[in-house]
Image: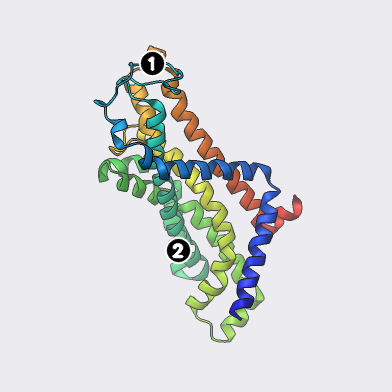
Amino acid sequence: MTSVAAARRRLALSRFWTDFRHHRAGLIGLVVLVAAVLLALVAPLFISENVTSVVAGVGKKWAPPSLSEPFGTDESGRSILLMVWWGSRTSLLVGFLAALLSIVIGLVVGVAAGHFRGWLGGALMRVTDWFLVLPSLVTALVLAAILGGSTFTIIMAIGITTWPSTARLIRAQTLSVEARPYIERSKALGGGHWHITTRHVLPNVAPLLLASTTLEVASAIVTESTLAFLGASSSKTSWGTMLRASYDFGAPTQGAWWYILIPGLAILAVVMAFTLVGRALEAVLNPRLRRNA
């Protein structure tokens, strides 16, 4: 039985990859994401955190892009290329962990609200609706200011304020799954809440959750950059803090367009890559979209 299950999983993965390869935009996004993650992981092997120190700048201040400094320098003579490279670690870390927290909360609340139909499900949805009507960016900004400026608090602030949409999506899918006849048969045979949610509901919502996760990471990266630009950021260098610094030190008035453009393009490239991968995953994993393609 184990070998049969393993063979089925390999066949399913093979079919998934075959379908995914037909989405050229998704493949391009995947290549960009793999490159960005690899660069972030190997950054400590080639550079150190000293590249972000204001006293470690050895180049000319506000130097435009050149052969020696491909992305130019900032107000302290630091290399924009090295700062963007090092800052990718913080931006991607916050994006992944904040999205993970948001997805976990949304998954638990959504499945519980869809499975338990009585007062518990109603109460969970009222809490979800309350969070949903709150302006997430403003709420995250307030939470980040209250909890203090650290990477952990930024992750918490983003994750706590962005889960409601995932919860509503998962609840709708849970209701759809539990309306199927085999759920009734499972209940008649003595299947409890844990058995039904883990053996029947979760496997059916997992594809939708996978596609949603990639989009949540993109949203979390943008939110982190926005919070950093508004001043609620950790002491770690990220693409958002670089944009904030370019504003604080008057990069536009200095004509240092590279200081604004390069971090902005890094955010745009990674967010677009996550979006392309998410849309491709949604098209592959959603049978309705696959039929319409």
Residue 257 visible in the current orientation: yes
Q: Position of residue 177 (x, y in %)?
A: 61, 68
Check disc 2: other Cα within 10 Å, few if <14, some if 14-19, many if 20+.
some
Q: Position of residue 271 (x, y in %)?
A: 52, 39
Q: Residue furthest right?
A: 292
Find disc 1 in the rendering and name its residue: 63
Q: Secondary structure at mark 1?
A: loop
Q: Earlier in the sequence, mark 2 or mark 1?
A: 1
Find disc 2 in the rendering and name its residue: 108
- The kind of residue tagged 1 is Ala
Residue 226 visible in the current orientation: no
Check disc 1: other Cα within 10 Å, few if <14, some if 14-19, many if 20+.
some
Please tell me which residue is depicted at 61% across the width and 81% down the height of the picture: 1
- The kind of residue tagged 2 is Val
Please tell me which residue is depicted at 47% across the width and 34% down the height of the picture: 267
Please tell me which residue is depicted at 48% across the width and 76% down the height of the picture: 194
Q: Secondary structure at mark 2?
A: helix
Q: Position of residue 251 (x, y in %)?
A: 38, 18
In the rendered view, would you say 60 is above or below 109?
A: above
In the rendered view, would you say 3 is above or below 276?
A: below
